[in-house]
Image: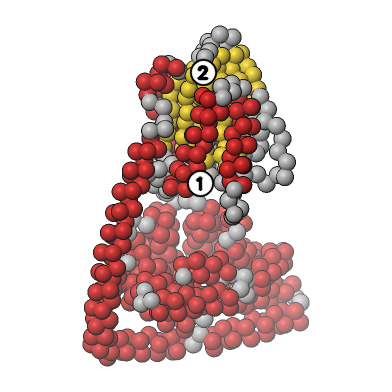
Amino acid sequence: MDKLLAVSNTKIEENYLLAQELSNEALKIAQNIFYTKGIADSYKQLASCFLSVSNYGEVMQYAMQAKELYESLDDKEGQANCLNTLGFVYNFTGDYKKRLACNFECLALREQANDFKGKLSTLSNIGDTYTVLKDYDKALEYFIECLKYDLDDHMNAIVNFNIGEVNYYCKNFEEATKYITIGLEYALKSGFWQITIAAYNMLSSIKLINGNTDVLTELDKALALATQKNAKEDIYEIYELYSSCHKQKGNWEEAYKYLELHNELKNEVLTQNNTHKLKRIEFDFQFKSIQSEANEIKEKNNLLTKTFAQIELQRNEIESKNIAITDSIHYAKRIQNSILPEDNKIKKLLPNSFVFYEPKDIVSGDFYWVEQVDEVIFFSAIDCTGHGVPGAFVSLIAFNMLNKVVLERKIKQPSLILSELDNLMRNLFSKSTEKVRDGVDMGICAYNTTTKELSFAGAYHSLFVCDGDDFKEIKGNRESIGFSIFKEKKEFINHTIEAKPGDTVYLSTDGYPDQFGGEKGKKLKWKNFKQLLCDIQSTKIHDQKEELKQFFYNWKNDLEQLDDVCVVGVRF
């Protein structure tokens, strides 16, 4: 149901009927399972669908129904969104005092819900309402308040255009042109077509007022965009500007043609959205609500009593199962932790090293491995398919195979180790009657304590080497161990470098660079991860783990961790 509403929201502009159909389908699902929030969300989305085609009668009906349901759920964000939508209706009816009341109620709810972005939008709406009430000083006060914040391109387009609009009404045409032009630039940058059309219209109007008829280019752009978006109210305003332009040029026939088009389309929109019809809908809805309130409450209480009894039984059953499952997973964590090398072992074999290990779930698909065979010390970061329980199962398989290849067979060359692991894993999974797509990505290093040479091979992993001011990446093969999209695999490549005192090397799974976060909620990416490794080179190796950990959590902030994280650093 939520997916249907999400898709509907993306389709509103390009296919209004499809968006409406998806919203109605979501509504039926929510009604069938007595999901009050789902019903409210569906009503709210239907209001948005009708708003996109200026059908204000349907907008008011659905928005008011949604608001009533959100109030019963104490859903402040939902109520605020409905009030915001109703504000558009009251703006159309010319009931600006009621719109202002909606704005202030909406602002209070958004402040309670800590909806910062919504609060900025509402402050702008309040300024807009004061504009139509011709209280221009108050309007500017709210718009200038918005400019104190770090606005995105969308909000910058709105606020700057609105400041320009106020100056337009105050006949400060120079200031108006300045701010409207800024608003237009942000609107074009962010794809905000409503402001784009409005800005073209108002800049054209300013030119015409000043006797400059060079406006046809702007009007053509505005009309093309408005026609594409089926924005009828914008289209009839553009027709009026065309008419004024041709009138000033003395093209009386063209001026009359556009005036006729303006009047015809305006009448069509006004007929469809008759103010009296809107007022009647509001009155009928309020009267119906009062009249049927007692019966509805009784019916809802009876339904809720039965529903809550069923929910209580289901909740107890689910809670019991969850406890059993969670206990099992926690026990599995103890088993998985037993395959990780102990801290004392790592300190002995790699005294100048760290491991930053942060599973996404209780158990993990990532693990790290440190061993010694004769004069060679091995260390590796391994990323098995998936995370959680499935990833943990594959990690145990990979661990046993790795021990078999290195500790039992005493294979010391990293490329041969990966090849042997690949053969073992493919043979294992080939026994399954179903096609198994599980595999392992890993990087493994072998440090010869006698020759001081460091060998590396990787399966979709790289080795990062910091040599003083020099930073380089040694890339492994671009294929996994086990499952492969290729019919034939290439041999894994062995890379060998001299490990000089002071050199630092890193192995990492993809969980760290793939994490979303930062101010814009974007993926960190390998480029920024490598830069981070460069930035912490002056830090002692044992302190680098804390640096990486703090950066990761600051970057992620409140966003969900997407994958297991494992970073191994070694300084020679």
Q: Which residue is mark 2?
A: 373
Pick whichever, 372 or 208, lies toward us: 372
Task: Give the residue at x 32% y 67%.
Answer: 75
| Res 307 visible | yes
As drawn, the residue found furthest toward the top would be 450
User: How did the renderer colour the structure?
Assistant: secondary structure
Residue neighbourhood size for the residue with mark 2, other residues' Cα within 10 Å, grouped as few (<14), some (14–19), many (≥20): some
Residue neighbourhood size for the residue with mark 1, other residues' Cα within 10 Å, grouped as few (<14), some (14–19), many (≥20): many
Nearest to N terminus: mark 1 or mark 2: 2
Image coords of residue 456 (percent x, y): 60, 24
Pick whichever, 360 or 295, lies toward us: 360
| Res 83 visible | no
Q: Is residue 356 above or below residue 91?
A: above
Image coords of residue 200 (percent x, y): 63, 64
Q: Amino acid at mark 1?
A: Gly
Look at the numbered disc 1 and give the secondary structure of its residue.
loop
Task: Give the residue at x 62% y 32%.
Answer: 420
Task: Give the residue at x 53% y 70%.
Answer: 8
Q: Are marks 1 and 2 in contact (CB under 8 Å)?
A: no
Q: Which residue is mark 1?
A: 386
Look at the numbered disc 2 and give the secondary structure of its residue.
strand
Which of labels 1 and 2 is toward the front?
2
Q: CA distance from mark 1 to mark 2?
A: 30 Å
Q: How many marks?
A: 2
Q: Amino acid at mark 2?
A: Val
Q: Is residue 414 above or below residue 304?
A: above
Image coords of residue 172 (percent x, y): 52, 59
Task: Give the residue at x 56% y 28%.
Answer: 405
Q: Is residue 362 found left or right of 372 in the rendered image?
A: left
Res 454 → quadrant: top right
Image coords of residue 292 (percent x, y): 28, 89
